[in-house]
Image (cartoon, helix red, strand yellow):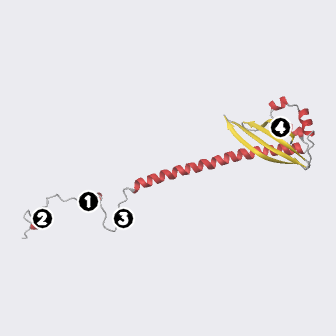
């Protein structure tokens, strides 16, 4: 017969002044984080969650801003390149003496009603441009309003012994057509 001795006797001198708490299972103790770490240990990571949320939010906003800038630069750059290409093609045709084709392919029908083909051709011929002439564009402005794209091109055609000022305006939804043109000898 073995006698079992109750180790939790109320008369135990080591337990005086201590309340009698029911024992808790180990799994429940592991769930409760200690309020303080041991000396030399890093502090608990409770406050870092907010830091990561803030940093993640800032990073997300920065990513969206950068993406927006890249898209804007590509859209504006492509519209600018399109306007420069149209102006360059038109000007090269006019310089080469192919004014009839330039009139047919680039001028908007509304501008063609205001400016006859014969008047356009004779006006270009009066500028007496030759193969020494080279265009240079000083200002290019592109815009889109209500789905209508527009481009304004300002520059100068430099020829041997003379210069010709130019100003074009292109408009359209899908295909840009010239709606305004100025070609005149530089002052």
Classify mark 3: helix, strand or loop. loop
Which of labels 3 and 2 is toward the front? 3
- Horizontal arrangement in the rendering, residue 148 relative to residue 22 (left or right): right
Q: Residues within 10 Å of mark 2 (few under 14, many from 20)?
A: few
Q: Position of residue 184 (x, y in %)?
A: 86, 39
Q: Residues within 10 Å of mark 4 (few under 14, many from 20)?
A: few
Disc on the earlier residue, 3 or 4: 3
Estimate the spatial distance between the alpha carbons at disc 1 and disc 2, rounded to whole Å. Answer: 21 Å
Estimate the spatial distance between the alpha carbons at disc 1 and disc 4, rounded to whole Å. Answer: 87 Å
Residue, disc 4: 182
User: Where residue 29 is drawn, which disc sits there?
Assistant: 1
Position of the C terminus, as image quadrant, is top right
User: Where residue 42 is drawn, which disc sits there?
Assistant: 3
Q: Are marks 1 and 4 in contact (CB under 8 Å)?
A: no
Disc on the earlier residue, 3 or 2: 2
Q: Position of residue 51 (x, y in %)?
A: 43, 55
Residue, disc 2: 15
Residue 154 falls in image quadrant: top right
Estimate the spatial distance between the alpha carbons at disc 3 and disc 2, rounded to whole Å. Answer: 34 Å
Disc on the earlier residue, 1 or 4: 1
As drawn, the residue found furthest toward the top would be 113
Estimate the spatial distance between the alpha carbons at disc 3 and disc 4, rounded to whole Å. Answer: 75 Å
Q: Position of residue 173 (x, y in %)?
A: 72, 36
Q: Residues within 10 Å of mark 1 (few under 14, many from 20)?
A: few
Classify mark 2: helix, strand or loop. helix
């Amino acid at each position: 017969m073995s006698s079992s001795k109750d180790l939790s006797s109320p008369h135990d001198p080591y337990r005086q002044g201590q309340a009698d708490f029911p024992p808790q299972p180990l799994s429940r103790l592991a769930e409760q984080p200690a309020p303080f770490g041991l000396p030399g240990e890093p502090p608990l990571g409770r406050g870092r969650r907010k830091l990561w949320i803030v940093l993640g939010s800032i990073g997300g906003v920065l990513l969206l801003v950068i993406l927006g800038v890249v898209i804007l630069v590509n859209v504006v750059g492509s519209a600018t390149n399109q306007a420069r290409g149209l102006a360059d093609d038109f000007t090269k045709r006019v310089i080469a003496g192919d004014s009839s084709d330039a009139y047919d392919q680039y001028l908007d029908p509304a501008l063609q009603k205001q400016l006859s083909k014969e008047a356009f051709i004779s006006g270009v011929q009066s500028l007496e441009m030759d193969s020494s002439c080279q265009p240079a564009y000083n200002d290019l402005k592109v815009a889109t309003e209500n789905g209508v794209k527009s481009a304004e091109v300002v520059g100068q055609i430099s020829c041997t012994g003379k210069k010709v000022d130019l100003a074009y305006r292109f408009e359209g939804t899908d295909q840009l057509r010239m709606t305004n043109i100025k070609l005149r000898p530089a002052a």
